[in-house]
Structure formats: C-alpha cells, structure tokens
Image: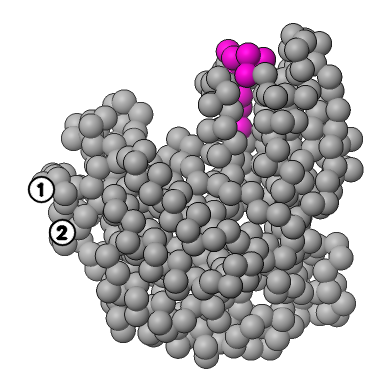
Amino acid sequence: MIDTAAFQGKKAAYYTLGCKLNFSETSTFGKLLQEMGVGTAQKGEQADICLINTCSVTEVADHKCRQAIHRMVRQHPGAFVVVTGCYAQLSAEKVAQIEGVDLVLGSNEKANLIQYLSEAWGESPRGEAKYYKVKTKDITSFAPSCSKGNRTRYFLKVQDGCDYFCTYCTIPYARGFSRNPTIASLVKQAAETAQEGGREIVLTGVNIGDFGKTTGESFIDLVKALDEVEGISRYRISSLEPDLLSDELIAYCADSRAFMPHFHIPLQSGSDTVLKLMHRHYDAQLFADKIHKIKALMPDAFIGVDVMVGCRGETPECFEETYEFLDKLNVTQLHVFPYSERPGTSALSIPYTVSDQDKKLRSKRLLDLSDQKTEAFYRRHIGEEAEVLLEKATRGKAMHGFTKNYIRVELPAKLASAELDNQLVNVRLGELTPDKQALRVYSLKFRV
C-alpha cells in the first residue's frame, strides 16, 4: 500500500535527454507524481525529487547525461535523485557511483518509480529517507505511456525495443527486443486523451513499424483504429523505418481523416556500401521509391530524414554518394548527427575510420543542405491558408504552432492569448521569421 501522504507537498524537477519516446515517458512520470500530490518545481525552486531520463545513442549523449546528473544534484542539494533511461540501463554501475544519485532504474523498472519512492520514504520525514540504489536488466516488459507534460501535443508510446541490431547501435541492448501493447489498449488511451481535451497525438516508439510482434497485430491496423477515435484531430508518426513504410500505409495516410502529411524516415546513409556495413534492411533505391510515393500522393508532405556521418567505412566517395543522393531527393529537413563509437557494437570491427575534423565538415555540408531545403519548402507555402494547432506561450510572448504538414508558424504577441492554446485556427501564412525557423502570421481568419 502506497502512502500518498508522504508525497503531499513535495516538489519534483525533471530533465530529459534523447528521443520523443523519452519525453513521453518523463511526462508520464510527472503525471503519476502529480496524482500523488507532487508539484513541479519552478525555476529557482528547490526540488525534493529529481528525475533524469537519459539517452545513450552516442558518446556525446553519455557525456551530456553525466553533466545533467551532476547539475541536478548541484542545483537541488538534498533531493532524492532518480536516474533512468538508456544510459542508466547500459551503464548502471557508473551512474550508481555518481555522488548524489539515490536510485538507478533500468528501461522497464522505471514503471515502478512510485513504488520505489514510496519504499525509500516509508513513513519517515524526507530528511530521514532511506537512500539506496537499484540496478536492473529487465528489458522484456512494456511500460505504457501517453502524456503531454507541459506541451500541447500528447505522445503515445505504441512500441518499445528493436530487433534490428544495426552495427553502430546499442538500442537493442538498452531497450530490449521489439514488443507492444494491444491495439485496443492504445485506442483506449487515445480516447482518454480526447476526453482530457487533447487534439494531437504523436505515435512514439523505438521501431514503431515493427508494431504487432507481441500481439499478432499490424501497424496499419493500429493506424486505422486510431483514425476512428473521436475528438483527436491530428496524429503524427514520429519515425518509421523505410522498409516498414508500406505503400498501403502511405496511401491510407494520404486519405486519412487525422493522420498528417508528415513523415520522419531514417536513412542514415545514401551509399549502398555503407548501408550494407550498417546492416540496414534496405538500399538507397528503396528509400528513394518511398519518398517518390509519398510526394506523388501528398505533394506538400513534410519529410524529415535522419543521416549519420563519419561512420566506420564511410570513405570520402561514400559520403559524396550520400550528399548527391540527398541533394536530388525531395525531402524537407535533415537530422544530421556524427557517428560515435559505442562499446560492444560490431561496427568496431570495420577498419576504415573517419577523423573528427572530417565528421564536422561533412555534418556542416549536410546541415547547410538541410537549411536550403527547409527554407525552400517554407517559401513555397507563403501566402497560403493553413490550419494551425497553437501552443501555449509565456504571457507577452509570441505563440507558435504547426500546420498539418509541420510548418512552424509564429503568431505575434499582440494576437496571442491563453484562449488560443490547443486551438485549431485557420491563418494566412506570411513571410519567414528572421531566423528562418517559422512563417509569421498577422491575422487569424477563423477558428476551426
């Protein structure tokens, strides 16, 4: 029996690194603690509980995790510090040795956060709390999550784990094999989100196109079932492997009631030589075919692409193949990140290495290409009318939101109001903001 009285009046601070799945899970933690009577510590306010949800996709991510833990311990002296996520799963002993860390939770044990905190506090005052650490390798169960935190959009976790074992990646070791809940349970969570007033849901997971391995269902069936949930106006698919992006799914999204013309598809490399070294499940031609199919049915679709630079085996010639492939491809934005060697991965056996300097140069070239593509995409839509879901802004500041095809818009402070938060409005898209990160809007045509 959990003693809720021990939680009343406590304050919690949260810090999340990594993917949208992590943000979804952190917001779920916050919701659970809020239900126990725990508030969120405001800026400058001391917290009783600190939760750091970590990432381990690169060596840089590991370093950022350690920095974040030290910073939270320093900023909130005496707080009960919990560290979870992929870095905690893969390097539990290292995390447990960091001064000030009280609890280390693996990928699935984080579902028992409230139970662990309750045991730590017991019936004693906070100052007499029992300090202890937990290390776990349980990565077989599924911890559900659907929450928004301080955002407008909800993030619904539909899948966890990965069976692919790409040569550069540690995610299967951190998250386990692919697994998922039932379609019925996810439809129920979406319906509850609608009852809470949610308008948009982002489907998250590690490899969501693999949905159904646990239950014998399929991702397209999940999409069709969610599309029928009343009250949810928009769905976005956070990331989908190109070999799992079926033509049937593309065609369905093109005619869907609520699935947006917005795709995020990991490429990693445009060189077939490198794709084979990575043990990816497709070639460049298959990827290009999927892009062409999307654009044929949804010409205005926003397409984001993950690209890794400087991995082992990526010769200058291979990189040029990637650059030329992406330069010709009708995509909107590139998410570029340099390869980082991860202990225990088979990529370490590939002899050809790329210097850090060359990784930086290659990253910059692709980031510049990305900026050109995104700006061109935005400019094509200036002057058009679009439906926008607006998000809460600080009083006196501009509001922001996204169109169906993920163009970020900015509503000047003089037009912003709290009543517009989480509202769908129709606007006329204006010129680019100075930073070229959004299109300005000077008038609201009407509310949807």
Residue 12 lies in what quarter of the image?
A: top right
> Mark 1–mark 2 contact, CB under 8 Å?
yes
195 shown above or below 381: above
Q: Residue 371 — which label?
A: none
Render colour scheme: one colour
Secondary structure, mark 2, is strand
In the rendered image, is residue 205 in sight? Answer: no
Q: Residue at x 58, y 72 (%)?
A: 216
Callout count: 2
Q: CA distance from mark 1 to mark 2?
A: 9 Å
**Residue 8 among magenta residues:** yes
**Residue 284 among magenta residues:** no
Work out whether mark 1 precedes mark 2 in sequence or the reverse, and give the earlier one: 2
Residue on which disc 2 sits = 385
Q: Amino acid at mark 2?
A: Glu
Q: Amino acid at mark 1?
A: Lys
Q: Residue at x 39, y 64 (%)?
A: 225
97 shown above or below 131: below
- The foreground one among 183 and 61 is 183
Residue 394 lies in what quarter of the image?
A: top left
Q: Residue at x 34, y 45 (%)?
A: 194
Residue 141 lies in what quarter of the image?
A: bottom right
- The foreground one among 343 and 434 is 343
Position of the N terminus, as image quadrant, is top right
In the rendered image, is residue 145 in sight? Answer: yes
Q: Residue at x 42, y 67 (%)?
A: 223
Residue 169, position in %: x, y?
74, 67
Residue 219, position in %: x, y?
49, 71
Q: Residue 445 — which label?
A: 1
Q: Which residues are magenta?
A: 4-14
